[in-house]
Amino acid sequence: MNAPEPAMAREIYQRIAANIAKVMQGQGPAVRRLLAALAGGGHVLLEDFPGTGKTTLAKALARSIDARFKRVQFTPDLLPSDILGVSIFNQRDQEFHFHEGPIFTNILLADEINRASPRTQSALLEAMGENQVSVEGERRHLADLFFVIATENPVEFRGTYPLPEAQMDRFAMQFTLGYISPAEEAALLTAQLHAHPLAALQPCASLAEVLALKQAVENVRVSEELKRYIVDLVGATRKIPGVQLGASPRASLALMKSAQALSLFDGLDFVTPDQIQELAVSVIAHRLVMDPQARFSGANGRAVVEEILKKTPVPA
């Protein structure tokens, strides 16, 4: 399928967003970021307190697209083979046959990813970075649409393992959903009085349409000045006192692609500084490693990126 015109691509986005909104009350900005990551070819990490709707958002997206969906509940005893798959010996033909794990899908929900050991978490690294997995010495390619939505509870909760820096860098974005307003929460109670709206949600977009949407994003223009602006924002994180490890070039790439997707959603065929500024915190902040002293003083990646946005000159 050829890349659709910007107006048609925007219609696909609006259709999916409206379908998700039937289930997710008051989460317009989160849905916008989630779909920007999907269309931009990235992956998403949702970090928030239990019960805020992280898993529901992932399921609502999966049900809105006519594509394969798998969920993995991460637990301390989960093994890499539980995700990637394993070869099992068949007595009948005396041969080993590979049984695919849940990673061979279009949309993968890695629920409570920080409850599994670092060894199991790292099983996703190659898949998220290169769209392939190496199992038992053999390389296996994943689907053209491979999108990981991982959820995690804050590390302060018992029985969790912080994600390593290399894993964090594989996520195009990290953001929270937060608590909705009292009026929206009351509407949520009414909506779920008899059954969960998720049960009635039907697909509103095909796999081919989502792949075409991703292709349309690639055609959104980014000026040389804005590419430099992105590089300046990301590069500034490597020079800030208190930041032990700044953002990598992968952050620059993720910010550009996500901004292209957002521009398309806004009906534009070119990126403006507005889209870059809207996404900068979600794309960059989670990649920063603060040194212990700065962390003890209350500094965090979000505050660092917000300060950089204020100080970096915006292209005219």
Image (cartoon, rainbow, N blue to C red):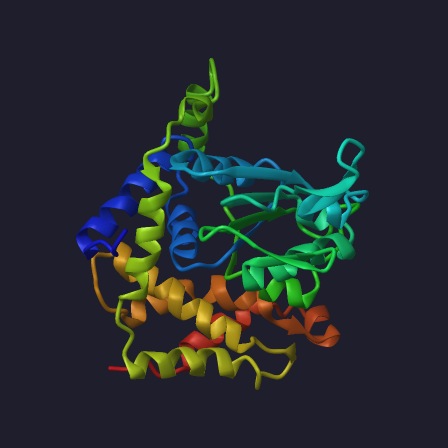
Q: Residue at x 29, y 74 (%)?
A: 222
Residue 312 sits in quarter: bottom left
- The residue shown at (57%, 38%) is 70
Q: Is residue 192 left or right of residue 154?
A: left
Residue 291 occupies quadrant: bottom right
Which residue occupies the foreground of this view, 230 or 157?
230
Question: In this rendering, would 138 be left or right of 132?
Answer: right
Residue 305 picture location, percent across and down? 50, 72
Q: State the quadrant of the C terminus.
A: bottom left
Task: Say if residue 241 shows up in the picture.
Answer: yes
Q: Residue furthest bottom?
A: 239
190 displayed left or right of 179: left
Q: How many marks?
A: 0
Percent of width and height locating residue 49 = 62, 43
For the point 62% across and 63% down, which residue is it? 168
Q: In the figure, residue 207 lies in which quadrant?
A: top left
Towards the viewer: 187 or 269: 269
Residue at (73%, 51%) from the top-left corner?
A: 156
Q: Is residue 251 above or below residue 170?
A: below
Looking at the image, residue 43 lies above or below residue 208: below
- Farthest residue toward the top? 194
x then y, percent, for residue 299:
63, 70
Inspect this view and state whether residue 262 appears: no
x, y (%) of residue 192?
Answer: 47, 20
Q: Tell which of 208 and 257 is nearer to you.
A: 208
**In the displayed structure image, the side of residue 268 where residue 39 appears, left or right:** right
